[in-house]
Image (cartoon, helix red, strand yellow):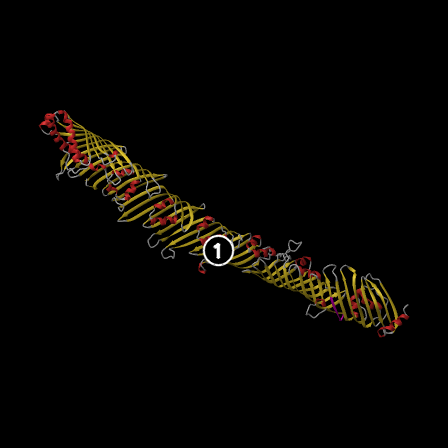
Amino acid sequence: MNSLSDLLWSLVRWAIPITFAGVVAAIAVGTSRINDEICARVEDVLAERFPSLQVDVQQASLNKGEGIVIHGLSLIDKTMPENWQQILRVEEVHLACDATLTNLAMGQPDIDSIRVVRPTLHAVHFQNGTWNIQKLFGNSDANVAIPVSVESATILYEDVETSFQETFQQGRLELEPGVSDSQGALWSKMHLSLNGQTFEHLTVSGAVSLSAKRFELEAVLQEFDFQPRLLSLGPVQFFEDTWWRETIDGLSMRLSLSLSAAGSMDALAETIFDVRGHVSDGRFEHQRLPFSLADVAATFTANQSGFEIQSIVAQSGGSHFQGSARVKGWSKQSDFECLLEAERLIVGRQWQPFLPPEWLGHWQKILPQGEVDVRAEVHRKNGFTKPKVSLRCRNIALTHYRFPYRLDRTVGTVIFEDNQLTMHLTGQAGGNPVQVNGVVQLADTGSVGHVEVRGRDMPIDERLLTAMPARGAEILERLHANGTFDFVFRQDRAPTFPKGHSNSLDIRLRDCTLKDVRFPYPLTNVQGSVQMVGEDWTLTGITGRNDTGIVHCSGRLDRSAGERGVLTLELSGSEVVLDQELRDALPASVGRFWDDLAPRGKADFVATVKHTVEQKKTEVILDATPHANTVSIEPAWFPYRLEQLQGRLSWNNGLLQLSGWRGVHARTTVSTEGNCRFLPDGSWHVSLSHLSADRFRADHELLRALPNGLQEALATVGPSGLLSIDGSLDVYSTNVVQQGSSTKRRCAASWNCHLDVEQGCFDVGVALNNVHGGLSLQGKTDGQRWSAVGEIDLDSAIWRGIQLTQVRGPILMDQSGVRFGAMTVSDGMAPRRLSAKVAGGIIEVDGMASSSGLGGFTVSASLADADLERIVCDSHGTPHRFKGRVFGSVEVSGSRAGTHSLRGHGQMRIRDADVYELPLVVAMLKMLRVKAPDRNAFGSSFIQFRIAGPHAYLDEIELAGDAISLVGNGEVGFDGDVQMTFRSIMGDAEEQLPAMKRMLGGASGQF
């Protein structure tokens, strides 16, 4: 405006008078040069006014009745690039006046008006903020004295920094002569209208005082298509604050507004203005917004004190925004009031880079994601911002950083006001409702309040374990928990807590399953409580079932016992089924012992499990008792089934203690005490003390169950009748399985036991019946070889009808056979014979029997001072009146191949006899099965014999009497045949010399 007025008034005030003078001179010279003179004068005047510019005027003419017309006026800046050199070009300038030569000759004509036709102004805005049209600006204080009009003006605008170009067309300007105000300043009225590519129409009207350089304007802008690059049109002072520039840079819109402004051209930033406008079809992007806003529409007002948005609406995807704002000032630190409401706003991690630091920390604690409605009121006064934010969650997911259990499909409200965060939410986790309630007061010294999360019928799954604190998750992972539960998680926050907060968790198990990794015994229908307070965990009232068994559990994770604490579980169970599941839960070494023991039935138990978390060390103490006589065992190494077990079993860190154990097999009761040790290599050692069994029979079932050595030992002795055993037994596990048996495992064993017999039978080289007494055995086996030594201690026994009492003597057995009497002697030991009392005398026996090959045996026996009458009566079973004392000895060897293998010799003598019937004397040979001879009466006798095969050869027989004696020999067959030859001699044969016996016997050899 200033440059245009300077230009016009330069033409009016200087060019016209000079032109008039030139015209007068031209008249004197000639009218053909009038136009040239006018052009030259106009160029000189403008060149003086704009010394830095080149002035070109194509043509000037005088038009009668119209005035002076100037054609093709150009102002050119030769210092600029070629395309920017022409700053202004005016096609026509009409100076309305009475421009006849007569009038011109008489003096200066009166100018009625100025009309500028089709001017084109090329305005270029450079990167440094300067304009090329600044060279058109002048300091003239002249005001418009006559009407001035500009028609069909064109303004070409170009911004170098943004490469933006714009063309404003159909410009029209009307200037009216000035009127003085009360201060004497002359004001010119103006009216401007302009069309452009970026707006539909612009009208500006008002008054301008060029002398005072002030203006009062009103403008109406219609349908202005605002783009950020149009900022270059405005004064730089308006956008010195980068915050405003950053805000405007992301804004595009269609703007209509009305403006009233008053101010000084020298202080445009202090302009008093009032703007009222409407925005439509807007779009806004900003580095502090994670999304762009579209379809922005707003109504607003602005003045020098600030601006106010009465209403604004926008869309972003499916989100709808509306709000209002009022800013008191134009700086970044201005006070403001802002209301924003958003429907279906999408929130998520994309918001984090745009949040203030004091909000970001709280945002990251819950990590919201989903769709919400927001109402936010923000007030800033004197530099202090006071927000009030209310969120209505439509469908949002939350994950709290202290308990990151994702909450989906959450609805409810979250309110932030006066630094207090209040939430009331209901969401879904694992398909079940979860409630979140909390109140937290935020402060610089630390937050105060609580957050509580409640859920029902929640599944125990990987999501829960991931969300829980590491130590709590470790417990549930150890328990292999599965099922559903109710829970309450609470976090209390206060600066007084060591970490600024304290967590608590209460879990109510509902129909869960548990399977501890250290003791993987599955429990179903588990109910109870798991509580966490701070760092400590407590298990209370937990019950579960396995088949008919009911297990109760309580426990505690005590952090005070170490860096990571000690977990202690107290377990008790009733009617627990001894099945494969329980076996699989035991340690590997105990499991192998279980397999060898093969328990069945139900048991009750009490156990304590202590697990040191840091050292990963577990200690188990367990006491178990059979339930209601239901337990039975059948050890693989002693397959003798015992039922109705009673007693107590204790386990303590690898030692299994048996106390008061008692079991029944048929009518036999077995009791014992003992223990079992499980070694690191997986082997075990059972030590049974006070092992006893009453009134049992050594049948095939019992013999089959015994360790190999003891089994073969007893099989060799061949016990029968009612037996009782008392002693100790140690069994050691081996990896050897007995050949031909899939149920009996060969084990190393050692034993020390005493076997009592009632009405039993033994075969200790000779057959003993009606045995009463005992047999002590001490032995061992490595699973393949065995040996046993013992002591026979029988009160009474019957041999071939003859009663033996106080049977005493050693016995030795091994896999090679059995030895008794003096044959058991080893180096450094005094020999002892197997002895017994018989018929008032003593019989001593030594012998052996081999278990290999044909089973050879050797027996050596001697008899001393036995009562003849008792022997005869016992052997025949009927009373006989014979008297005498019997002495004798025999040695026999053979095998089980038959009687043909027998070999031996012996002798027998009867003293102090009163024998009336010969057959009774000979009956002493009953062991050789000799038939009774004819009767005779003798006082003593002597027989010397030998055994060969099934025959006993009587090499010497003497029957001595007081009057007559018989001497001879014979043969006895085991089939009952007897052949004897006697010779008689006079007198007692014992008193005869051997030669006399032959001589006298020869005389009666035919007898």
Tell me the chief SS of the magenta region.
Answer: strand
Task: Please say whether residue 732 is visible from this viewpoint.
Answer: yes
Q: Is residue 844 magenta?
A: yes
Per the rendered image, the range of residues in magenta is: 839-846
Q: Quadrant of the C terminus?
A: bottom right
Q: Report which residue position mark 1 lands on.
A: 541
Farthest-out residue, front: 29
- Nearest the camera: 379 or 364? 364
Residue 900 screen position, x and y as percent: 79, 60
Residue 183 screen position, x and y as percent: 13, 40
Q: Is residue 724 magenta?
A: no
Q: Where on the picture, by quarter, is residue 533? A: bottom left
Q: Where on the picture, by quarter, is residue 155? A: top left
When the figure is inspected, residue 289 is found, relative to residue 886, above or below; the finding is above
Farthest-out residue, left: 106
Left or right, 190 with reference to 816? left
Question: In what element is the residue under mark 1?
Answer: strand
Pointer 1 local density, CA inside 10 Å: few below 14, some 14–19, many at least 20: some
When the figure is inspected, residue 600 is found, relative to residue 836, above or below; the finding is above
Q: Quadrant of the N terminus?
A: top left
Task: Please say whether residue 176 is visible from this viewpoint.
Answer: no
- Nearest the camera: 982 or 524? 982
Q: Where on the picture, by quarter, is residue 269? A: top left
Residue 673 screen position, x and y as percent: 60, 63
- Amino acid of disc 1: Gly
Residue 528 screen position, x and y as percent: 48, 53
- Nearest the camera: 134 or 66? 134
Left or right, 338 with reference to 931? left
- Nearest the camera: 266 or 962? 266
Total numbered labels: 1
